[in-house]
Structures are given as C-alpha cells and as structure tokens.
Image (cartoon, rainbow, N blue to C red):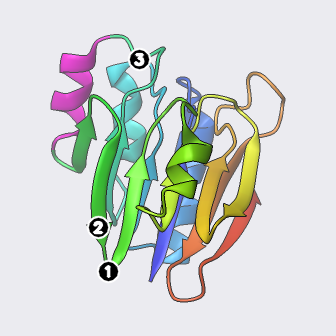
Amino acid sequence: MLIGVISDTHDNRDKSRKAVEIFNQKGVDLVLHAGDFISPFNCKDFSPLKAKFIGVFGNNDGDRIALKEKFAPIGEIFSEAHRFEYLGKRFILMHQPILVEPLARSREFDVIVYGHTHSVDLRRIEGTLLLNPGECGGWLHGRSTVAVLNLETMEVEILDI
C-alpha cells in the first residue's frame, strides 16, 4: 500500500496538478496533505485524484470554510493535528512541527507527517518515522517535492516535480 504525501502547495496550480498526476501514476491509495493549500480554487487541481484524501490546515490557509466545502467531494480537511489509524499504522498529520520529536519519542505513532518548514525531513526517532515532504509549491526554496510512503516496507521516496 502506498501513501502520497504533500504539503505547502501555496496555490501553485501547475505543481499541484503534477503532484496529482504522480500520485495517480504511482497508484497511491491515500494522499495526506500537511497544510497550506491557501485558496479554495486550488481544489480543482486535486479533483482528478483517484485516492482517498486527508488534509489539515496550515498557518496560511485563508477561507477555511470554503476549502472544506470544495475538498469535501474528494476527502476531508481537519482544523488541527489529526490522529488516525490506517492499515494498522498509527499516524498524526499536522502542519507545524511543534513537538514532533517528543511525539516521536512517545511511541504513540508509527508515522508523523508535517509541513510548514518547506524542507524535506525524513528520519526515524525511536522507531517512529518523521516525514516532511518539503514544499510542493516551490516558492521558498525553488524545489518542488512530494513523497510516497510504502506502508509495507516503511520506505519513503522523495520525488521532484
């Protein structure tokens, strides 16, 4: 089972469309968005997505009510950090990296996904995978990336788009 991971799209519609194409080509079953969509019109670019979708809001997301409404046909966006279990793995999805290391050390989660920093972070702490896919938008560092997590092997592929 594959999970697509994306963050910080920041209204870069071209990169968002390319990310969706990659996730569809890879055959991911679930896409996690770690926040900073920005505007509701960005939802159009995610509509071709063939996978289930879960997101959380970031600090720059504007019209949250409209974002929730526009994304409702493909998935759900949560206001804060979202804990869930998927195929036996315990996840927390958040935007800001507040307390990611203590959360990892707590051993409550198998995977912690976050965004906000616009930089790829891929490491393990006490058996917990910390994953920041970097920025899809590419506005801050000039590199647009997404990640694909293989739940069977717990290996992550960082993909430039």
Q: Position of residue 151 (x, y in %)?
A: 50, 80
Q: Locate residue 41: give its quadrant.
A: top left
State how far apart marks 3 and 1 are (Cα).
29 Å
Q: Residue at x 69, y 42 (%)?
A: 134
Q: Residues within 10 Å of mark 3 (few under 14, many from 20)?
A: some
Q: Earlier in the sequence, mark 3 or mark 1?
A: 3
Is 120 situated left or right of 72 in this image?
Answer: right
The quarter of the image holding the N terminus is bottom left
Q: Is residue 21 magenta?
A: no
- The residue indicated by pointer 3 is 61
Disc ID at residue 85: 2
Q: Is residue 149 left or right of residue 43?
A: right
Residue 45 located left or right of residue 72: right
Name the quadrant containing residue 31: bottom left
Q: Are marks 2 and 3 in contact (CB under 8 Å)?
A: no
Q: Which residues are magenta?
A: 63-72
Q: Count of labels shown? A: 3
The kind of secondary structure element at disc 3 is loop
